[in-house]
Amino acid sequence: IRFNQFASQQTHPADLGNKLTIWVMAPGYHGPVPEQVKWIIVTGPNMLWWQQRWPQLNHHSAKVVSIPLEYWRQCVKQLQAPPSAGFLLLHTLRQLIEPHKIECFGFGYQASSFEHYHISDPKHQPTSRHNWALERKIIAQWK
């Protein structure tokens, strides 16, 4: 599973790997859509039919699905803020799969800062609309 702009000129396949089965796309994402992906998940409050890039996704060979609205609402209630795409996907997976069967690699938060927030774009900074501290705490509890 990869998120939004997961690769760039600053990243190398030797560091990130090549496999891409599921690509998670935040509603506001405006970058390129990967060609080799089999599934595209659009996050947000049931954003699939309101997706601004729907014409581009409509012609893509991947299957396109969205996160159920109820899962997004559960996250908003728990966080008192909109969830990040990563948190929302992990929450959704926990609803669909036994939590002990979920393994995550390359996903996390720096303990005190977002110095290395985005691997493909070092200048990209996290948005303030998410409750990063509470997301980090909940994910730590899930471990």
Image: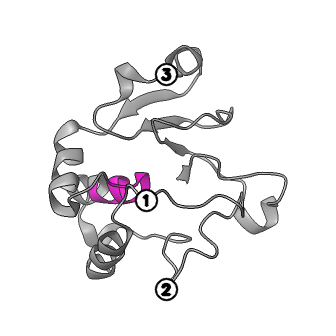
Q: Does the magenta stretch include residue 51?
A: no
Binning the other alpha carbons within 10 Å of mark 1 as few (below 14), some (14 to 19) or many (20 upward) gives: few
Q: What residue is drawn where x is 60% and y is 37%? A: 37
Q: Residue furthest bottom?
A: 111
Q: What residue is drawn where x is 71% and y is 58%? A: 120
> As displayed, is residue 16 above or below residue 100?
above
Residues shaded magenta? 83-91
Q: Which amino acid does label 1 sit on?
A: Ser
Q: Which amino acid does label 3 sit on?
A: Gln
Q: What residue is drawn where x is 29% and y is 32%? A: 46
**Does 11 sit left or right of 70 as displayed?**
right
Secondary structure of residue under mark 3? loop
The residue under label 3 is 52
Q: Which of marks 1 and 3 is nearer the N terminus?
A: 3
Q: Which of marks 3 and 2 is nearer the N terminus?
A: 3
**Front in this rendered view, residue 128 or 12:** 128
Q: Distance between the residues labelled 3 and 2?
A: 34 Å
Q: Earlier in the sequence, mark 2 or mark 1?
A: 2
**Does 102 sit left or right of 17 as displayed?**
left
> As displayed, is residue 38 above or below residue 106?
above
The residue under label 1 is 128
State yes or no: discs 1 and 3 in contact (Cβ < 8 Å).
no
The residue under label 2 is 112
Residue 14 image position (x, y, % from top left): 81, 66
Binning the other alpha carbons within 10 Å of mark 2 as few (below 14), some (14 to 19) or many (20 upward) gives: few
Q: What residue type is labelled 2?
A: Ser
Mark 3 vs mark 2: give the one in front: 2
